[in-house]
Image: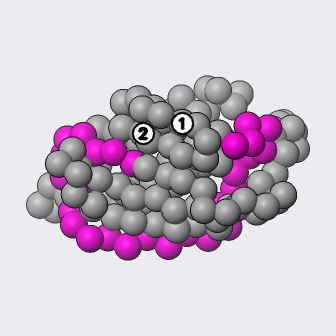
Amino acid sequence: MTEAFANTVQTTLGQVRIVSNQDGRSVIEYEIGAHMCHSGGVAQGGFVCGWIDAAMAHASLSLAPDMTPMSLEMKVTYFSPARPGRVIAEGWIERRGRTTCFAEGRLLNLAGDVLAKASSTIRLIPREAVEASARRALA
């Protein structure tokens, strides 16, 4: 159930590959398709947010694979438009506690220009509890 859902989300977000994911840092490559864009060929902001959020979640999972990261809040600052083509989302953990961690991330184009930055407060919930809740909800 979890794997099938993850593959669907990864496909929807245009994930190409996970470049690296270890020691509280993650780098993920995405392909922006025309179907993700609105006027003027600019990627919709929700995708930008999703790419950075996914990188921060992966960074969290690299430190605690048995804990599911759940965003409590997230702030995104957009600097430049993201246009069709490849982008890189980076995420890292600034500080981690037992049940909460603080993450930061950014989205870059292939030239290395920062297109957006984000910070997030993440609640860490045991994976077994999240999966059990999902099974109950789908029953």
Residue 6 in sight from this viewpoint: yes
- Left or right of 36? Residue 47 is right
Above or below, comparing residue 128 to residue 111 in the picture: above
Q: What secondary structure do most residues of the magenta stretch adopt?
A: strand
Q: Residue at 40% x, 58% y: name it.
A: 106
Badge 1 amino acid? Asn
Task: Work out whether residue 82 or residue 22 is closer to the camera in this orientation and state it.
Answer: 22
Q: Residue at 77% x, 54% y: name it.
A: 124
Task: Work out whether residue 106 or residue 22 is closer to the camera in this orientation and state it.
Answer: 22
Above or below, comparing residue 101 to residue 14 in the picture: below
Residues in magenta, as a range: 63-89
Residue beneath disc 1: 21
Badge 2 amino acid? Ile
Residue beneath disc 2: 28
Q: Which picture quadrant has residue 135?
A: top right
Residue 138 in sight from this viewpoint: no
Would residue 77 be counted in the magenta stretch?
A: yes
Instruction: Assess whether mark 1 and mark 2 are in contact (beta carbons under 8 angstroms).
Output: yes
Report x, y in % for residue 57.
60, 49
- Left or right of 25? Residue 30 is left
Report x, y in % for residue 78.
32, 70
Number of the front mark, 2 or 1: 1
On the rendered image, what quadrant is the C terminus found in? top right
Q: Which picture quadrant has residue 30?
A: top left
Q: Earlier in the sequence, mark 2 or mark 1?
A: 1
Mark 2 is surrounded, within 10 Å at the Cα level, by few (under 14), some (14 to 19) or many (20 or more) other residues, namely many
At numbered mark 1, what does the secondary structure look like: helix, strand or loop?
A: strand
Report x, y in % for residue 1.
71, 28
Mark 1 is surrounded, within 10 Å at the Cα level, by few (under 14), some (14 to 19) or many (20 or more) other residues, namely many
Q: Residue at 43% x, 70% y: name it.
A: 76
